[in-house]
Amino acid sequence: MPNTRALHKRPHPQHVAIIMDGNGRWAQRRGLPRLAGHAKGVERLRGVLRACPDLGVTHLTLYAFSTENWKRSTDEVSGLMRLFRRYIKKESARLARDGVRVRFIGNRHRLDDDLQKMMGWLEQLTAENTALNVTVAIDYGGRDEILRAVRRAAAAGVDPDTLDEAGLSAYMDTAGLPDPDLVLRTSGEVRVSNFLLWQAAYAEYDFLDICWPDFTAEVLADCVARFSARERRFGAATA
Ligand code: FPP
């Protein structure tokens, strides 16, 4: 007999996390500079965020800049930072009005001071919002996050013998947020790339052949529908 209590068919994923990959390839295929792909990628966010509440998605986590992305050219890194600044300036009023709460995870202190301030300001501005929780991972790496969490727990004097999974989760950047149900990656690459390593332990993955600048609300709806057709077992036996 299967452990039916461990069988969950979820009507929809409440927390979707996205590795927004393929901006560079999208641009190069069109003879455009890589940054044009990133800019198009940023443009896609508005429609995706708008679609989430109707799809029952309450949490959306976006991988915007990894700890490894610092190795890209100075031009590309500064271009991405410019896009982050522009996004906050341009979209903050709309996000606040639409009830979106924005949080940032990652190292943060390695970013320019002015950008850090803008991020903190947007977090405060939207702190009371509840329609959609958006978490943006910037200078984020899953291993780095786990390491920082362990260091924080040690610095707080936590006894390693009593530390359990929930205890360590409380020291992660994502403390208080639910784990992702569904992780999407665009661009055809089938890799996890250091994204939410701790939190995505039981997530479903969906790898899409399109590049991120081609991702639309309709694509998200398809991914949600595919997820709903899957049965999640959380380690239980097959029926
Ligand atoms: C990966 O494509 C994408 C990135 C490194 C950046 C993603 C960032 C955005 C879409 C901007 C997000 C902005 C906000 C405000 C959340 P790639 O350059 O690795 O593509 P490639 O693999 O084709 O080269």
Image: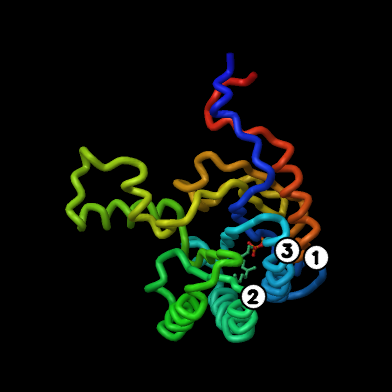
| Colouring scheme, one of rainbow, by chain, secondary structure, one colour | rainbow
Q: For the residue marked with disc 1, what is the amino acid?
A: Arg
- Could you tell which of marks 2 and 3 lies nearer the N-terminus? 3
Q: For the residue marked with disc 2, what is the amino acid?
A: Asp
Q: Ligand 1 closer than 8 Å to the CB at disc 3?
A: no
Asked if residue 152 can be seen in this view, the reply is: yes
Q: CA distance from mark 1 to mark 3?
A: 28 Å
- Residue behind mark 2: 98
> From the viewer's perspective, is residue 184 above or below residue 63?
above
Q: Point out residue 112 in the picture as x, y percentages from the top left corner.
A: 43, 81
Q: CA distance from mark 2 to mark 3?
A: 12 Å
The image quadrant of residue 117 is bottom left
- Residue behind mark 3: 51
Q: Point out residue 149 in the picture as x, y percentages from the top left corner.
A: 33, 54
The image quadrant of residue 48 is bottom right
- Could you tell which of marks 1 and 3 lies nearer the N-terminus? 1
Task: Look at the image and tell me in which quarter the N terminus lies.
Answer: top right
The image quadrant in which ligand 1 is located? bottom right
Residue 230 lies left or right of residue 201; in this view the side is: right
> From the viewer's perspective, is residue 96 above or below residue 156?
below
Q: Residue at x 70, y 43 (%)?
A: 227
Q: Point out residue 102 in the picture as x, y percentages from the top left corner.
A: 53, 71
Neighbor class of circle 1 (other Cα within 10 Å; few <14, some 14-19, many 20+) is few
Q: CA distance from mark 1 to mark 2?
A: 35 Å
> From the viewer's perspective, is residue 81 above or below residue 167?
below
Q: Residue at x 78, y 50 (%)?
A: 222
Q: Residue 29's mark?
A: 1
Residue 48 lies left or right of residue 30; in this view the side is: left
Asked if residue 82 can be seen in this view, the reply is: no
